[in-house]
Image: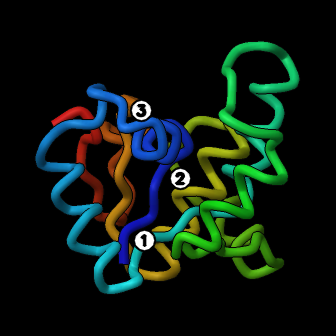
Amino acid sequence: MIVLDTHALLWMDANDAALGKQARSLIEQAWRQDSVAVSAISFWEVAMLALRGRIELPAAAEIWRGELLQAGIREIPVDGRLALLATRLEGLHKDPADRFIAATAMHYGALLITADSRLLEWTGDVARRDARL
């Protein structure tokens, strides 16, 4: 399974060149196996960015989310188990969304696709790939 960080989700959806060829290939392979997921917190992050005018979505956040789910992306809810794991990620910065996303990938043994240098440089036990490559 692949877990996309929020920006990787946005890049994938917009077919943005910022998403590197290797990352795109990994996502496409996982997509064919119904193995591409996002933490539910990513939809919250996207909605907040849109609300603040920092990004523009092709549709209202609720519609955009529904279209992605219908296309086959898996949404992993933030439950108590993940919330507690997110508190135990030693050495990771305090951004709650990043902590939930990392905890999600860790819990499911998934590959995290991210371009966030703080997540890429973190020494925690989660497989990750740079979304820009």
Give the mark nearest the N terminus, 2 or 3.
2
Q: Which residue is mark 3?
A: 116
Give the mark nearest the N terminus, 3 or 1.
1
Hey, which quadrant is residue 48 in on the image? top right
Q: Position of residue 55 (x, y in %)?
A: 67, 20
Q: Which residue is mark 2?
A: 90
Q: Position of residue 95 (x, y in %)?
A: 68, 36
Please tell me which residue lies in front, 73 or 95: 73
Q: Position of residue 115 (x, y in %)?
A: 35, 34
Q: Secondary structure at mark 2?
A: loop
Please tell me which residue lies in front, 20 or 108: 20
User: CA–CA distance between discs 2 and 1?
Assistant: 26 Å
Q: Which residue is mark 1?
A: 36
Mark drawn on residue 85: none
Q: Residues within 10 Å of mark 2 (few under 14, many from 20)?
A: few
Residue type, mark 2 in image: Glu
Residue at 30% in and 26% down: 18
* Residue that lies at the very extreme toward the top in this rendered image: 53
**On the rendered image, what quadrant is the C terminus found in?**
top left
Residue type, mark 1 in image: Val
Hey, which quadrant is residue 77 in on the image? bottom right
